[in-house]
Image (cartoon, rainbow, N blue to C red):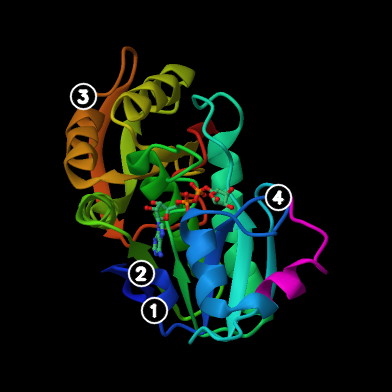
Amino acid sequence: MNPFSRIQIETGDITQSDCDAIVNAANTSLLGGGGVDGAIHKAAGPELLAYCKTLGGCKTGEAKSSPGYNLKARHVIHTVGPVWKGGGSNENFLLESCYRNSLLAAKELSVKSIAFPGISTGAYGFPMEAAASIALKSTLRTLFFNEIPQKVVFFCFDDKAREIYDITLDKLKAIQRAVFSIHGKVQGVFFRKFTQEKAHQLNLSGYVMNQKDGSVFCEAEGAEPDLEKFYEWLHTGSPGSNVDHVTIDREDPVFYNGFEIRFLSR
Ligand code: AR6
């Protein structure tokens, strides 16, 4: 199933969620705190803290699970987000790991539905726009590979956060994958180099490679208008090349390579 159709965004208090599991934005001690952590412990009751004491803490980016006790959710998955230090301390990777590891923990528990708060976006200071983008991309990519959990709900605590999640998800939905076959005198090194540079400029990811029949194959992923510009540009070619014609196919984006890989020549 398309990973987008398995994602929901809601506004409200995550402790009220009726998902099978809720995720807690904890700290490395797992012994409670303020924000969503405090609210979850309060709603779950003191047994949660007693259980968490047996877990031996949790490293940043990792996840550990516990029962939900008095919560509607049967499980709480505790994850520890990174403290925002300006972006140069591996924060993006660590936040992405929180979502991936929480979803994999949910899969281990055979959880059908899971609710996430905006990990690191409160006391830990991660900018909301960047955090929402990482949360959604990391989740889409993990769902692409895993049938379980079936449903993921992102709980926004206020209208501002909700607006950011809605806009970010709409932008991601607009991402498409296109496959181009470029025919003509196009197999020179320059053609691949210029094509890669142009794709970078247009914020596209993907790759370019020579085909045995003398054509060049190019797969690119990005926003629809950027793919259109790229398509137009491909007809002009690069110095020394001579493009005869270009064919294009479109498909759903592929989340296993999208957003991450850089343009490679093969
Ligand atoms: N439901 C949904 N979202 C909530 C709720 C709630 N009940 N309460 C707060 N939020 P934070 P962090 C939102 O600070 O940044 C704790 O003390 C909130 O608006 O809870 O990862 C831990 O023990 C924000 O967008 O988590 C750690 O020491 C988001 O949840 C530290 O805070 C996360 O805010 C973790 O900081």
Q: Is mark 4 within 8 Å of ligand 1?
A: no
* Mark nearer the N terminus (3 vs 4): 4
Mark 3, residue position: 236
Q: In the rendered structure, which amino acid carries the disc numbered 1?
A: Gln
The mark nearer the N terminus, 3 or 2, is: 2
Mark found first going from the N terminus, 1 or 4:
1
Magenta-tinted stretch: 48-59
Q: Residues within 10 Å of mark 3 (few under 14, many from 20)?
A: few
- From the Cβ of disc 2, is ligand 1 less than 8 Å away? yes
Question: Is residue 51 magenta-colored?
Answer: yes
**Residue 230 placement, left or right of 101:** left
Q: Look at mark 2 in the image and give the residue it sits on.
A: 13
Looking at the rendered structure, the number of numbered marks drawn on it comes to 4
Front of the two marks 3 and 1: 1
Q: How many angstroms separate mark 3 from mark 1 (CA)?
A: 57 Å
For disc 4, the marked residue is 28
Mark 1 highlights which residue?
16
Earlier sequence position, callout 2 versus callout 4: 2
Asked if labels 2 and 3 touch by Cβ distance under 8 angstroms, the answer is no
Marks 1 and 2 in Cβ contact (< 8 Å): yes
